[in-house]
Image (tube, rainbow, N blue to C red):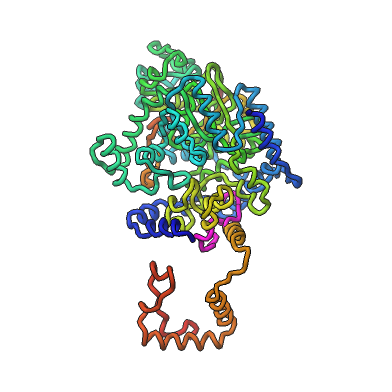
Amino acid sequence: MSDALKNRIHEAVTNPQLQKNYYKATSSAVEKNEIRSKTPELFEQFRTQAQHIRKHTLDHLETYLEQAENKFISHGIKVHWAVDAKSANSQALKILQKRGIKSLVKAKSMLTEELEVNDFLIANGIEINETDLGEFIIQVAGEKPSHITAPAIHKSAGEIARLFEEHFNLPYTEDEHILTEFARNYLREKFLTAEVGISGANFILADSGTIVLVENEGNIRLSTILPKVHIVFVGIEKMLPNKESLGTMLELLSYSATGQKFPGYVSLISNAEPERELHVIFVDNGRTALYKDSEMQELLHCIRCGACLNSCPVYQHVGGHTYGWTYPGPIGALLTATMRREPGDEQLPFMSSLCGACTAACPVKIPLHHLLLKSRHRTQSKRIKSLSWNLGMKGFSFISTHPKWYRMLMLKARLLQKLIPGKFLWIPLWSKYKKFPKLAKKAFRK
Amino acid sequence: MMNLNKKQILNKLKRPAKSDLPELINFRELENDLLDIFKIEAERIQCDIYKCNNINELTSTLEQAGVNLEESIISESAHRLIKNDNNTVYSTKLSHSELAAYKYGITVPDYAIAYTGSLIEINTIKGDRRLSVLPEIHIAIVFKNKLVATLTDCLMKMTLDSNYTIISGPSRTADIEKRIVIGAHGPKQLKIILVGEEKY
């Protein structure tokens, strides 16, 4: 594991405020998913159906993309294609420059984080106003999102209060109602005067050419209804075949992301209204490469719900920023290792105990922990050469398969424990964070 | 330039083995009265519910709900229902700021979903999508015959030629320490008037 990653992990796990924040953020998420906790068989049926929908859609992706494009064009929606971030960002900039636009409002979109759209547009003189409360907070703080659906979840109310006090002279208050009201009033003016709104898309329906946008705050509706121009960034993998598949996908997305039965607002946009412009930018940025990867192509089924993050004990302790890229948690580790593939990215799948909680939580049944292991295999093309490792593993497998030797060893260990205190027992890296446990006086079977 | 991108992308999406779309099962079946279920579900997501028997009682029920018609901007479909001489402004003529100044936005949803307590608004060309999102309080007049059991039932009837909005409760957020705040950027309250009349 690289030093940079080790340092990020160390910083996260030794920060008590951060540990508290993440514990709060993730601890209730699994129980809140009522369809999973109260009706597990039904959840299973839903997941299987969703898995098949996504598999089918990806199998026929080319057809569905073309179908959607044709529908969009016939309804007055302009379609653009971008192989990478550079292409996507410059096409968006062209749309803005053509109309002489200098500022815009933005709805939350993980794809735009991945493409670094904000940095690019700001460097070209465009003012960006993030409108999702979490994104607004981290924009003010100058940070990146730490979660797929709740970008500011790494911050405590106190930290946010201090932030607003420093930047806006708002009297210090940890009352989330007052903080939210402030953001509402501050952004109202931006909504009412913005000429362009940028959003992502949760899904694109192929047969009707429909952009599906899901939210709770209302900022997406305001960003996409009020401005004269609406630009949609969407990954090519976000397709669904038809509106009939929407029932299953929306309910699963809602439960898995926030534990809600249904999202607060769902916008189904199929038309560009008169005197308004609607642009859709289909983005590749590494997705076609993943498409050809027979082991990893299931990663494209992801609907970005964040359930795997919420259920992951590693994410809970290291937090989103440790992963080093846009997407954290199990899905993030895999996407970073297989799609971005910068030096060091292949280490991320090793930051896991392979407990499988993510796989159990995934609404579209991506076998996440199996893929984490497969990703690890790719870095271990040769046998491990370390002598101590090989000897140690041989010893361990012998002891574990020969009960008499195991019992003898444990007896000796118990005697030894009386002579040598625990603190002298030391395992590299592990002992930095944990105390060696005491062996029980009597064996469990006695 | 754009077409080159498109060709490059689509050429990489060839796949030999193709699975069929499964027959989609709607897992939800509702047994009780749709109106009762709708009321329970809508209240669960912080809607305020008011009932009246027919459209003649509408104005008095709006009063009961604390709605001041002088501070209300009313949709075209709602105009036919609410006998009010004061307010004949058609919202589409208003700028964003002018419309945002109204306290109440009154609309008549095209469907209501019992299972989730949701409203569906079909935004035709003449319609105004701002009415249910800009004013501070959204008033929705739901007729009994517009009730459908689940979203899937509703999707069967919809053609998605126009723009649709599915509304479930007032706006909310939990971005600060996962503490729920009702009233984010959209309406802070959603008041639903249930009209028992069969036809509209």
Instruction: Give the camera-side residue of A263 and A143.
Output: A143
Is residue A198 found left or right of A20 in the rendered image?
Answer: right
Number of numbered discs overlaid on the protein picture: 0
Q: x, y (%) of residue A375?
A: 59, 57
Instruction: Give me the residue at 23% from left, 38% from top.
Output: A171
- Up/down of B95 relative to B166, above or below: above
**The magenta segment:** A349-368
Examine the rendered structure and indicate whether residue B87 appears above or below residue B170.
above
Residue for point 50% across, 23% down? A229
Q: Is residue A5 visible from the viewing direction of this image?
A: yes
Asked if one can make out residue B52 in the rendered structure from this viewpoint, the answer is no
- Residue B4, picture quadrant: top right
Q: Percent from the top left, x then y, of residue A304? A: 53, 45
Can you give x and y, in whole percent of width and height, for residue A73 in the image? 64, 24
Above or below for A7 versus B2:
below
Name the residue at 56% across, 45% down. A252
Is A276 in the magenta?
A: no
The outermost residue toward the right is: B16
Viewer-closest of A144 and B39: A144
Toward the viewer: A360 or A120? Answer: A120
Query: Looking at the picture, does residue A408 appear above or below residue B29?
Result: below
Residue at 63%, 47% in the rendered image: A290
Most prominent secondary structure in the magenta stretch?
Answer: loop
Q: Give the image location of residue B181, x and y in percent.
A: 36, 40
Q: Quadrant of residue A237?
A: top right
